[in-house]
Image (spheres, rainbow, N blue to C red):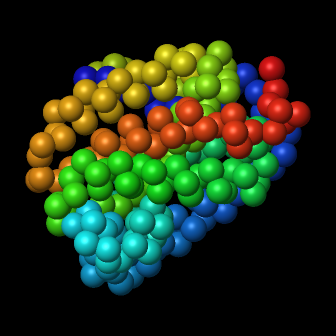
Amino acid sequence: MGGMIPLSDASRRPAHFPVVTLLIIVVNAIAFLLELLLGDSFAMQWSVVPAQITAGHAWITILTAMFLHGGWLHIIGNMVFFWAFGPEIEDAMNPLRYLVFYLMGGLVATLAQVAASPKSTIPNLGASGAIAAVMGAFLVTYPRDRIKSILFIGWFARVTLVPASLLIGIWFVIQLFSAGAVVHSDTGGVAYLAHVGGMIFGAVTARLFEVPERVGN
């Protein structure tokens, strides 16, 4: 067993403080606190249920679900990945463009999952799709950057530098194969189609949101 946890971009530092990235993390943390205080009923109320969306109901959950999480590992993992890639993409855009990009990425990711399982009554929640869009943007903007990461191989762990193109590329391939394995399943689990949809959106549209003067070499 092995894996990698990205920590930060070792090749550059943002020229501007990542206020939107930090704000999104805070909003996710507040939403998770509300989940802990109010219980499963709160999470169920504001999660996306594909069958409801295709029936034309509860559309607001497309927005609210991207700030909810299914547990401590879910939110911690998402926010670690987000902090590893978000500040540089916010810097390459600007706060307002970046916020719009993030929300649109989450929207496209959710719609991709709904399209894959339009009759599903299983709630979907999490920031993974929007974060996948940020990773897609990073892949096309800074593919040669080296990402400081924790590499796990069995019980062995070490901090190493991994090219962004390799790290994100491997992650995307895993999502593709996993999506293919569960696309006909209606038993719950990870919304891999949301990850794929979000990342493709990010990679395709990143240049439309970026400010050329802000993109470093």
User: Is residue 7 visible to us here?
Assistant: no
Q: Would residue 13 appear left or right of 147 to someone viewing this image? A: right
The residue at the point 45 percent across, 51 percent down is 108
Against 161, residue 18 (above or below) is below
Against 54, residue 39 (above or below) is below
x then y, percent, for residue 118: 22, 58
Q: Quadrant of residue 9?
A: top right
The residue at the point 44 percent across, 74 percent down is 60
User: Is residue 186 visible to us here?
Assistant: yes
x then y, percent, for residue 174: 32, 27
Question: Quadrant where the C terminus lies?
Answer: top right
The residue at the point 55 percent across, 39 percent down is 202
x then y, percent, for residue 111: 37, 54
Q: Would residue 22 appear left or right of 30 to someone viewing this image? A: right
The residue at the point 83 percent across, 33 percent down is 212
Question: Quadrant where the N terminus lies?
Answer: top left
Q: Quadrant of residue 69?
A: bottom left
